[in-house]
Image (cartoon, rainbow, N blue to C red):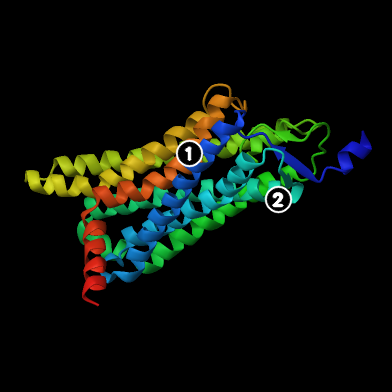
Amino acid sequence: MEANQTVVTEFILLGFPVDSKIQLLLFGFFFLLYVFTLLGNGVILGLIFLDSRLHTPMYFFLSHLALVDIAYACNTVPQMLVNLLDPAETISFAGCLTQTFLFLTFAHTECLLLVVMSYDRYVAICHPLQYPVIMSWRVCITLTVTSWIIGILLALVHLVLLLPLPFCGAQKVNHFFCEIIAVLKLACADTHINELMVLAGAVSVLVGPFSLIVLSYIHILCAILKIQSGEGRKKAFSTCSSHLCVVGLFYGTAIIMYIGPRHGNPKDQKKYLLLFHSLFNPMLNPLIYSLRNKDVKAALKRILEKERTA
């Protein structure tokens, strides 16, 4: 038993138990989604960087959201694609724990960034005259850096608790990446504290922030309803609709996975839900912001016109 616990150097990701032809189809499909994710978020980052009209707090936060989405996809999808081509391909023990740590870091950071973005919209609509003072660049940078730091520290807590655990038996992770609950199932020791911390962490970065977002939008809705002109109400709501769509997709899937029924059970249902959360969400976010945001579309037109005339 002691020997088995000390020689663990790699894991096998089970991924999707389908035949080889379906695996090739999935590889092509997921590869296209991965490319679209990188391109979409890359375009958002490029537009915000190149167009001075997008150098505002709202788009500063959006650039970090796009950065997180790119990191999200790059952390999980390449290994998943490798395993679709070669199901026997392994991931090292260190690589697995690194993937777990990075996934948790990006997930926590995105939760907090979405709260910061909702606060930005709250100030813009409910206190428009004070907006430049309240959302100064110093405040924006502080909020963003704090989101990243808290995200890293929370992920570090899970990693520190995970490292001492002994692993034994068949090291087959029932997932397409090293998701923390799936990895904990392989430990041959009591993981009650680890699972409790996962639940506590999920509550702290999902339920708490989501409640703050709901509270922000209650105030925003009240402020919008007080606007006399229909055009003014439409303009005010349009600045929030994209963020609301992203919040709904992100928090909806995350809460079901980590706080919903059968918590900690890496069954296929939650595996596919997490696939949506870690692959489809990052791809959809830039589409939501570009299709529903006039400023982003206008910036894209200006950049394209400059390229044509150059």
Which residue corresponds to the image point at 25% horizontal and 44% vertical from the top-left?
Answer: 220
The amino acid pointed to by label 1 is: His
Horizontal side of residue 38 vs 244, given as left or right = right
x and y, in percent, of residue 66 in the image: 42, 55
Q: Position of residue 263 (x, y in %)?
A: 59, 26
Which comes sooner in the sequence, label 2 or label 1?
Answer: 2
Q: Secondary structure at mark 2?
A: helix
Give the answer, above or below, for where 244 lies relative to 304: above
Residue 15 position by quadrant? top right
Identify the disc placed on residue 277: 1
Residue farthest to the bottom, as pictured: 310
Residue carrying label 2:
95
Q: Are there few (<14), some (14-19), or many (20+) residues within 10 Å of tag 1?
A: many
**In the depicted view, which residue is nearer to us: 245 or 113?**
245
Foreground of the two, 222 or 117: 117
Q: Is residue 253 left or right of residue 14?
A: left
* Label 2: how many Cα within 10 Å (few below 14, some 14–19, many 20+): some
For the image, the number of numbered tags is 2
In this view of the protein, can residue 228 be seen by the observer? Answer: no
Question: Residue furthest toward the front?
Answer: 21
The x and y percentages for residue 128 are: 21, 57
Tell me the SS state at disc 1: helix
Q: Amino acid at mark 2?
A: Gly
